[in-house]
Image (cartoon, rainbow, N blue to C red):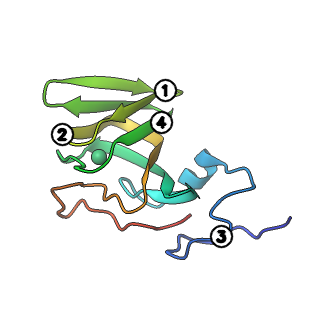
Amino acid sequence: MYAPAQASPTTQAPADRGQRKTIDLLGKIGQIDGHWLPHVVAEMNDYQFKVVKIEGDFVWHQHADTDETFIVLEGELRLDFRDGAVLVRAGEMAIVPKGVEHKPYAAREVKMMLIEPRGVVNTGDVGGERTAPNDVWI
Ligand code: NI
């Protein structure tokens, strides 16, 4: 079935919620203007698949109510924890347990996918200026 490409990010979820079609994850990331701005590409039940590109350092935060999955598509992500760090390379994934403080870091640009329940805020419990709008589809 033909479906026209979305011209720009929108807060209006598509009727198909990204289902019954293939999704070009890197192509979607290529449409994002800026770093640290997750965009939703699909939903499964009450979970969202988000793509994002990041570079540099983020803020320490935690998500009290949910685990958070990172799947790296390009580059090398460092997930900092208070007691160490985990390197996640392209083709690898890592899960941050709920309630565990973490800080993503990318020495060079990283393109990745996040999987988390609808409504999760990127800065978790700390909020602030790095908080990205939620439910922006691309
Ligand atoms: Ni987080």
CB under 8 Å between discs 2 and 4? no
Q: Is mark 1 within 8 Å of ligand 1?
A: no
Within 10 angstroms of label 2, few (less than 14), some, or many (20 or more) residues? some
Say which of 2 and 37 sits in front: 2
Say which of 26 and 17 sits in front: 17
Marks 3 and 1, the one that precedes in the sequence: 3
Question: Which of the 4 image quadrants contains residue 69?
Answer: top left
Say which residue appears at 34% left-offset and 42% top-offset: 67
CB under 8 Å between discs 4 and 1? yes
CB under 8 Å between discs 1 and 2? no
Q: Amino acid at mark 1?
A: Glu
Q: CA distance from mark 2 to mark 4?
A: 18 Å
Q: Is label 1 in a helix, a strand or a loop?
A: loop
- Of circles 3 and 4, the one toward us is 4
Q: Is mark 2 within 8 Å of ligand 1?
A: no
Marks 1 and 2, the one that precedes in the sequence: 1
Location of the C terminus (image quadrant)? bottom right
Marks 4 and 1, the one that precedes in the sequence: 4
Q: CA distance from mark 3 to mark 1?
A: 29 Å
Q: Which residue is mark 2?
A: 101
Q: Which residue is mark 1?
A: 92
CB under 8 Å between discs 3 and 1? no
Residue 46: image x %, image y %? 49, 58
CB under 8 Å between discs 3 and 4? no
Q: Which residue is mark 4?
A: 71
Within 10 angstroms of label 3, few (less than 14), some, or many (20 or more) residues? few
Q: Give the side of residue 22 with respect to residue 64, left or right.
A: right
Q: Give the side of residue 37 with respect to residue 127, left or right.
A: right
Marking on residue 6: 3
Within 10 angstroms of label 1, few (less than 14), some, or many (20 or more) residues? some
